[in-house]
Image: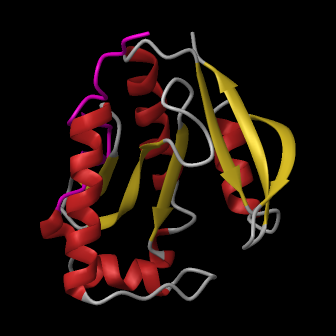
Amino acid sequence: MTYRPLASELETERLSLRPLVPADAAEWHLELLGEREDGTTRTLDEDRRLLADLLASEAANGIGFRTIRRRSDGEPLGYTGLLIGRASLDEPELAYELLRRHHGQGYATEAARAVVDAAAATGRTRLWSTVGPWNTPSFRVLEKLGFRRDRVGADERSEFVYLVRDLP
């Protein structure tokens, strides 16, 4: 099946979502990576290359990531978007990550809801998300968005929970 590309620019009441580009390889993005449980670190050059690869992937398959910025001041808060990940191009995975200082303010739910709506507009009928079993805040976000728990999986790094949402 052929899908329309994910909308490049999305707006919500408080947020602006634009493609994650190599210029986003900045202090805020490196800080976000450093906050991860797995201790991920990258140099600025490594991060630029990764973001360029993600942009090339989006050009090839029509889905990708969006930088989340607050509309009032343009501050980058994190990212959200769709990826193949542990899912497929037909039924991609929703992902989001915010800097810790922006947790608990509803930004993840607001941004992810915009991506879910944009995913439906591509013609897709189902989305997935995978979450570590310890990540209670992400379970709350996904439940607000209509995702339901499907099963538990694991890879060489960790155990995770698959959540699924049918799209209208």
When the figure is inspected, residue 16 is found, relative to residue 25, above or below; the finding is: above
Q: Is residue 141 visible?
A: yes
Looking at the image, residue 25 sits to the left or right of residue 91; the answer is left
Give the dominant element type of the magenta stretch: helix, strand or loop: loop
Q: Quadrant of the N terminus?
A: top left
Q: Quadrant of the C terminus?
A: top right
Looking at the image, residue 36 sits to the left or right of residue 107; the answer is right
When the figure is inspected, residue 165 is found, relative to residue 42, above or below; the finding is: above
- Segment tinted magenta in the rendering: 1-21
Looking at the image, residue 71 sits to the left or right of residue 148; the answer is left
Q: Residue at x 52, y 23 (%)?
A: 90
Instruction: Tell me where residue 30 sits by quadrant.
Output: bottom left
Q: Position of residue 14 (x, y in %)?
A: 32, 47
When the figure is inspected, residue 43 is found, relative to residue 113, above or below; the finding is: below
Q: Residue at x 51, y 84 (%)?
A: 35
Q: Position of residue 126 (x, y in %)?
A: 61, 22
